[in-house]
Amino acid sequence: MTKYIFVTGGVLSSLGKGITSASVAALLRNSGLNVSMLKIDPYINVDPGTMSPMEHGEVFVTSDGAETDLDIGHYERFLNDTLGKKNNITTGQIYSTVIEKERRGDYLGETIQVVPHITEEIKKRIKSAGKDKDVLVVELGGTIGDIEGLPFYESVRQMKHSLKSRVYNIHVTLVPYVAVADELKTKPTQHSVQELRRIGMTPNMLVCRSEKHIPKEIKKKLSNSCDVEYDSIIEATDARTIYEVPLQFLSDGILKPIMRDLELGDIKPDMKEWRKLTKRIIEPANEIKIAFVGKYLELKESYKSLLESLVHAGAWCDTKVNCKWVDSEDLTNSNLQDMLGDVDGVLVPGGFGERGVNGKLEAIKHAREQKIPYLGICLGMQLALIEFARNVLGLEDANSQEFDKTTKNPIVYLIDEFIDQEGGKQIRTHKSPMGGTLRLGSYECNLKKGTKLREAYSDTERIVERHRHRFEANPKYKEIFENSGMVISGESKGLIETVELQDHPWFVGVQFHPEFTSHLQNPNRTILGFVENTLKLK
Ligand code: GLN
């Protein structure tokens, strides 16, 4: 008998609905309940895979190979768990399923409508995500009142009607402070609750984002005017780190009303380890500075998981990882010293397209020659191989087929076929469409004994990490790389997965995206290895 907590947003976006949802879920999970999460995105894209990272932030890749909203990343990090395809639904997915069924004739001549056909499909997917769970926390994307969200709110209303007290609504809202009047204002919250009521929903709890502490009288006023119990008005002031949010909620008594209204029994979360790690994030003993050489720097959200994974690794080493943002398009041989002279480590993240590639190659050369710890992720590994091939092996035209289709030395190339997660053969050509042609999701990788990366994984031979790329390192060059000191440290069924320099304190490239599996309570070992060694070598 799954219980559902729907988290809706009022007044405006960016109030932290994702973190609120993940925090509530984390508290319930750490109380021993079997909890999962679902994100509903009302946009018409089938998934965010084709959206620009500059517009939508990072595309988060799940273990089962789905390209999902970045909030799924927060959910995994807060739940310390693995989610999948079914934990993110979009309007695009709902409509394509319903239209497909209609074309097949499954509806036996009925007229297809938003109610009931679309809402039935939505409810089916919500229930499927909640199957066998004690609690499913569902975040509804967007803000109450948006046209796109209506079918989803209607589905929630219907679920409330049939499941009664097994459905709970947390409404995240803003209580703004007006400086001239020196007052916290409740009116926007009242209005957004009215908007919820208009479509048949009544919130059980208000999470009030505010820059000031919310005094008793304001809570009472909100309780009366919005018809929400006094103990269910929760204050959410700005936290020093997102990992502090569950702790703040806990001390503001968020679990008492949830426990009571959803009849969860007497639960008490064990947040000891969480508290310890959060304290280290807030008051770290050490500091390091790394150059983050990327090209989507205007919107840091496009590197969300990577930034969080640095926080996790930092917390485990009691170290703050400061990022120096280096736009690869601005980086040239002549300003290299200015840009990278004062950093303890260099990080080149994943990326698509040729823009900024030369700057990244410069940064890699600098890290290799100056023996600065280096981590290259996906494109960052591919470029490390290209830099090495050009400057050490003397293959001047070494390149990736992504940037030069006719190069004589395709160090990074488009493989025509590979075996996917389900064991099926995947065919790739230069003409493949953009959407859905990437090597996606979790794949095994075998690490070579005695390598730095294997050491980072406590001498584990077989690791599993997530992928999102179209091109691969070309195994034809394996031997000449290894003979010159670039070791192929990890492979997966003939594909080159990880590389490292022999004659360097810590220079590692990985084809996978280690950041996707990093959790506060379980940091990713590649990232941890990078941070630990950068600290050690500082
Ligand atoms: N553009 C490269 C590829 O498609 C790398 C992708 C990435 O860094 N995620 O293979």
Image (tube, grey):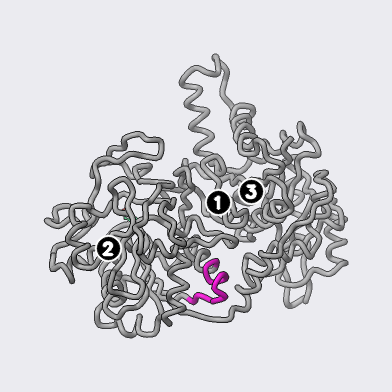
Q: Do the residues bearing badges 1 and 3 touch, measured as CB atoms within 8 Å?
A: no
Name which of mark 3 and mark 2 comes first in the sequence: 3
Give SS at disc 3.
strand
Q: Which residue lies under the disc numbered 1?
A: 72
Q: Which residue lies under the disc numbered 2?
A: 487
Separation of marks 3 and 2 at Cα, in angstroms:
45 Å
In the picture, the disc for residue 139 is 3
**Amino acid residing under circle 2:** Val
Name the residue rendered at 28%, 47% in the picture.
494
Residue 333 on image: x %, y %: 24, 79
Categorize mark 2 by other alpha carbons within 10 Å: few (<14), some (14-19), many (20+): many
Q: Is mark 1 within 8 Å of ligand 1?
A: no
The reply to whether residue 192 is in sight is no
Name the residue rendered at 68%, 54% in the picture.
10
Q: Nearer the viewer, residue 23 or 64?
A: 64
Q: Which residues are magenta?
A: 312-322
Q: Is residue 315 magenta?
A: yes
* Position of 160 relative to 116 (above/below): below
